[in-house]
């Protein structure tokens, strides 16, 4: 009995010793494995950082040229204009700091207020007429009609035509004596048609008509893209509810085009307030000052008269006007989205 107990105790001791040795060996092996994995993880992290750095460099290689171009051609001139607006400089002398004198002079100058008024009237006519014409064309040319691609191209073509050519052609059309427009008006019974670009009351409307005709093709394309993005299910649901074509337009098309309309509004606002070339070619600001706009006044004061400080002050005011209007439009749009 005692021999059996001794054998059992010896076997238990042997088993315990074996288990202890196995545990130590496993711990040692685990420690070696962990030690081997540490440098591997470090190398993987370093490789990941290098990959991210290469990706960032590739991204910056695409962005940097645009940033440099923006800084050189936009940011630096804006800052330079801001500084010049507080100086008296005609390119022959050293710029002299005069504070707000240029702005006081602007406030008392009739040419500035006339140009601001003409620019505002131009924008008030150009923006809504272009939006209405381009939307109407887009709705009409969004139909499945034969030859619709040709008409889309034909209406877009004036936008890519030389603006000088457009202005010259429309000057011929608006000729008081032999122009086709006045000949048509006489044919329908108007005894004394307008003088258009030679009349102080009709020169600005003539410029607005020309600009609407030129620009509506471009904004028509934007509205076409918006129309084709409207789900057909909305129109089908409106038809099921008994809505006619007019109600479908007002309750489906117009609300769905709000993002496009907002973009068109902002683009037209900016282009209307900085209009220059069309006015310069068609009327040169005349007759008198009836079509003088702010961009043209800046050109006259800066390039023609050499008063760069004063023209920079007018440029700064024009920039602030456009900025305020654009920011107001964005805030109004966000409020409507809520």
Image (spheres, rainbow, N blue to C red):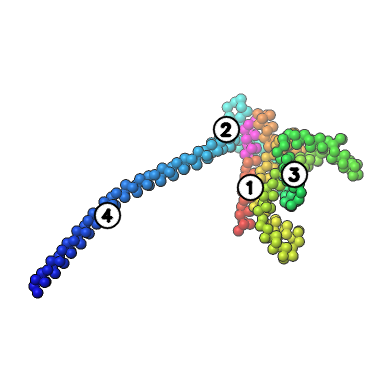
Instruction: Between label 2 and label 4, give the one nearer the viewer.
Output: 4
**In this view of the protein, which residue sits in the foreground, 262 or 125?**
262
Residue with the most extreme left position: 2
Picture coordinates of residue 185, whole percent (x, y): 87, 42
Per the image, the residue denoted by label 3 is 150
Q: Secondary structure at mark 3?
A: helix
**In this view of the protein, which residue sits in the foreground, 35 or 197?**
35
Range covered by the magenta-colored residues: 307-317
Q: Quadrant of the C terminus?
A: bottom right
Q: Which mark is residue 314?
A: none
Q: Earlier in the sequence, mark 1 or mark 3?
A: 3
Q: Is residue 26 above or below residue 12?
A: above
Q: Which mark is residue 326?
A: 1
Q: Earlier in the sequence, mark 2 or mark 4?
A: 4
Per the image, the residue denoted by label 2 is 97
Q: Is residue 115 visible?
A: no
**In this view of the protein, which residue sits in the foreground, 20 or 42?**
20
**In this view of the protein, which residue sits in the foreground, 81 or 99?**
81
Instruction: Between label 3 and label 2, give the one nearer the viewer.
Output: 3
Q: Are marks 3 and 2 in contact (CB under 8 Å)?
A: no
Residue with the most extreme top position: 92
Picture coordinates of residue 139, whole percent (x, y): 73, 52
Q: Secondary structure at mark 2?
A: strand
Mark 1 Cα within 10 Å, few/some/many (few <14, many 20+)?
Answer: some
């Amino acid at each position: 009995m005692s021999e059996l107990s001794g054998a059992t105790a010896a076997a238990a001791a042997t088993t315990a010793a074996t288990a202890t040795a196995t545990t130590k060996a496993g711990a040692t092996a685990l420690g070696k494995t962990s030690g081997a994995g540490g440098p591997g993880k470090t190398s993987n992290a370093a490789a990941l950082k290098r990959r991210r750095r290469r990706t960032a460099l590739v991204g910056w290689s695409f962005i940097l040229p645009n940033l440099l171009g923006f800084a050189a051609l936009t940011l630096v001139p804006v800052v330079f204009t801001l500084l010049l607006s507080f100086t008296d400089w005609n390119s022959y002398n050293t710029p002299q700091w005069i504070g707000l004198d240029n702005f006081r002079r602007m406030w008392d100058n009739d040419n500035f207020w006339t140009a601001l008024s003409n620019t505002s009237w131009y924008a008030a006519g150009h923006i809504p007429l272009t939006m209405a014409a381009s939307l109407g064309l887009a709705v009409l040319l969004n139909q499945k009609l034969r030859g619709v691609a040709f008409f889309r191209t034909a209406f877009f073509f004036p936008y890519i035509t030389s603006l000088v050519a457009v202005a010259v052609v429309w000057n011929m059309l608006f000729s008081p004596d032999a122009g086709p427009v006045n000949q048509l008006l006489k044919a329908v019974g108007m005894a004394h048609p307008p003088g258009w670009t030679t009349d102080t009351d009709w020169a600005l409307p003539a410029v607005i008509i020309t600009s609407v005709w030129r620009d509506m093709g471009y904004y028509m394309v934007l509205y076409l893209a918006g129309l084709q993005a409207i789900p057909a299910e909305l129109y089908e649901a409106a038809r099921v509810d008994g809505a006619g074509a007019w109600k479908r337009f007002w309750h489906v098309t117009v609300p769905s085009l709000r993002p496009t309309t907002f973009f068109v509004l902002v683009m037209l606002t900016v282009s209307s307030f900085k209009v220059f070339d069309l006015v310069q070619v068609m009327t040169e600001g005349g007759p008198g000052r009836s079509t003088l706009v702010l961009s043209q006044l800046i050109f006259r004061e800066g390039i023609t008269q050499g008063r760069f400080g004063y023209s920079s002050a007018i440029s700064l005011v024009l920039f602030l006007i456009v900025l305020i209007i654009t920011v107001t439009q964005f805030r109004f749009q966000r409020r409507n989205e809520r």
